[in-house]
Amino acid sequence: MEVANASRPSSKRQRTDENDVLLPPPGSSNGVSSNLDLSLLEALEKSQHAVEVLDLRTVKRLVLSFERRLKENIEARLKYPNQPDRFADSELELHEELHKLKILAGGPELYPDLVNLNAIPSILNLLAHDNTDIAIDVVQLLQDLTDPDNDDDDENNEEHARILVDALVENNVLELLVQNLHRLSDTGEAADPDEMAAVYSTLATIENLIEVKPPVAELVCERTKLLKWLLGRIKVREFDSNKQYASEILAILLQSSTANQKRVGQMNGVDVVLQAVAMYKSKDPKTSDEEEMLENLFDCLCCLLMPLENKERFVKAEGVELMIIIMKQKKSAYGSAIRALDFAMTKYPPACERFVDVLGLKTAFAAFMGKIPMSKKNKKERYQEELEERIVSLIASLFGGILRGSRRERLLSKFVESECEKIDRLMELYMRYSDRVRTETDRLDSLELDDLEMNEEEKYNRRLESGLYTLQLIAVILGHLWCSEHPQMRARIELLLKQQKLARKDVKDILQEFHDNIGDLDGPEEKERAQGKIQRFISAF
C-alpha cells in the first residue's frame, strides 16, 4: 500500500510590473532556463510526486524514531524537571512522531507488526504524560487506528483490528483513557477547545473499541469510572456536542448488557437520566443534534427499565408522573414518554397501579383514540404506527398488572364510556393488523412455492414483525374485556365481530397461536403462568 507525502507546492510565476503578463525567466527558451540542468529538474519533479510505501520496514522506522524521541523526552524531563524550556523541544519532536504514526491507520494489515514491535505500551503510557497536549495526541492517534472504517469490510483487516484492540485492552487502554478523561476540562467557562475535542475523540475511541470487540462494553464499566463520568456529563444543563456523545455512549453501554443496566441503577442512574429528560418536559430541543441527544436519553431510560429493581427505582423517583406530564405537554418527547411507560409497566404491577392513581388513564386513552400531537417531524405514517403499537402494549400491561379492585373497575369503565367507543377503536385496530398479518402470511406462502426454504420459526418471526405481536395483544385485551362478563362490552364485541363477518373463533385462533409460542425466557414457572392466563381467555371465548 502506498501513501502520498506532502502536497505539491505551487510554482512561482514572474509578472511584469504594469500588465501582469506571464514572462519566462531571463535567458530562457520556452520558459526553461538554458543554464538549468535538465536532470536536476527531473529529480525535483520526482521528489514532488514521492510516495512512501507502507510496509514492515516503514513501521519499524516509525516505531524506532518514536521510541528515540520518547527516550529523549523522558531524559530531558528527568534532568530538568523544573525548567520546561529545557525539555520543550523534545516534547515538540515527540508530538511530531506521534503525528507521523497516524499514517499506520491506512494499513491495518500492519497492526500485528505494530503489536509485535511492542510499541503499544510506550504509546499508551503517554496518556498519563504530564503535558496534556501529548496525551491528546495519543487519544487522536488511537481514534484513527481503531476507526472501523479502516478495514474496508475486509475480513483479514477485521482480524488485524481485533489483534490491535486486544493488545490495547491488555495494556490498560480503558483505564488510561478514562483517567485522562477526568483531567480534561470541557464544560463551563474553563472549557478548553482542544480538551473538548480530546473528550470527543476519547468517546469515539471507546465506541470504536466496542465495535471491534463488543465485550469491551462491559469491561470498560467493570474496570473504570466511565459510567460515573457519563452520568455527570449528562447532568450538565447546557447542551453541546460532548453531552450528546456522552448520551450516545451511555445508550451503547446499556443496550445489550444487563450487568451495566444494574450498575447504573445502583449509581442512582435512573434518577439522573430522569432529571436530564425533565429539562424537556415543557420545551422542545432547539436543534436536530439536541433532538438526537433527547432520543439517546430515552434509549438509556428504556434500557435501564429492563431489570426489575430499576422499575422500582423509576416509580420511587416519580418517573411515571414525569412521563404523564411530558405526554400532557404534547412536546416532541410525547412518543418517547409512551415508550418509557410501556417498558416500566411491562410485568410490573406497582408501576401500573401508580399510573392509574396519578390519573394517567385519561392521557393514555386519548393517545389510544388517535389524538396524537402532530408536527413536521412525526407526520410520517410509521411514527403513528409505532405509537399505536406502544399504546396497545401499555394498555395490555395495565390489564396484566391490575387484576382487581377499584383500579380494575376504572380501567374497564374506560371501554364502556361514550357508547363503547374504545371497543370500536380496538376492533378497528384488530381489523387493520389482521389484514396486515394475512398479507404477510400470503407473501411468505408464495415464497415457499418459489422454493425458498424457510422454517416455521422464521415464518413466525416475520409475521410478528409485520404486526402479529400487536394483533395478539389486541386479542389479549379483548380477552380481558370478555372475561369481565360485562354484558354491554360483550354485546359490543359480538356486534363488531359480526359486522366484519368474523366469529369469536377468529379471536380464539390468534390467542391459541400466542399461547403455543410463549417462550420460557423468564423460566418454566412464568411460562406456565402466562399460558394459563391465555388459556382462560380461550376457554371464555
Image (cartoon, rainbow, N blue to C red):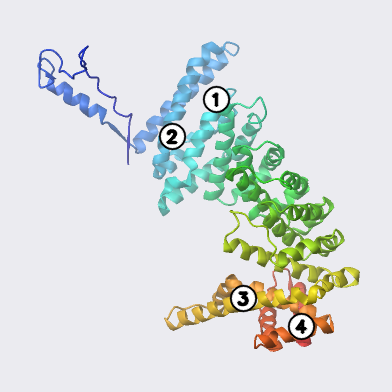
- What residue appears at the point 41 percent right and 26 percent down from the top-left corner? 65
Question: Of label 1 and label 3, which has the lower sequence position?
Answer: 1
Question: Of label 2 and label 3, which has the lower sequence position?
Answer: 2
Q: Mark 2 — residue?
A: 102
Q: Mark 3 — residue?
A: 432
Residue type indicated by callout 3: Arg
Instruction: Say what secondary structure mark 4 lies in.
Output: helix
Tell me, yes or no, whether the two marked residues, 1 and 4, touch with CB atoms within 8 Å: no
Residue in front for this viewpoint, 100 or 192: 192
Cα distance between the residues tagged 1 and 3: 61 Å
**Residue 343 at x, y = what percent?**
72, 60
From the viewer's perspective, is residue 514 above or below residue 235?
below
Dot 4 alpha-carbon crowd within 10 angstroms: few under 14, some 14 to 19, many 20 or more: some
Residue in front for this viewpoint, 527 or 35: 35
Front of the two marks 2 and 4:
4
From the viewer's perspective, is residue 163 above or below residue 421?
above
Front of the two marks 2 and 3:
3
Tell me, yes or no, whether the two marked residues, 1 and 3, touch with CB atoms within 8 Å: no
Q: Mark 1 — residue?
A: 133
Question: Of label 1 and label 4, which has the lower sequence position?
Answer: 1
Front of the two marks 4 and 3:
4
Camera sees residue 344:
yes
**Residue 436 at x, y = what percent?**
57, 76
Q: Mark 4 — residue?
A: 492
Instruction: Say what secondary structure mark 1 lies in.
Output: helix
Dot 3 alpha-carbon crowd within 10 angstroms: few under 14, some 14 to 19, many 20 or more: few
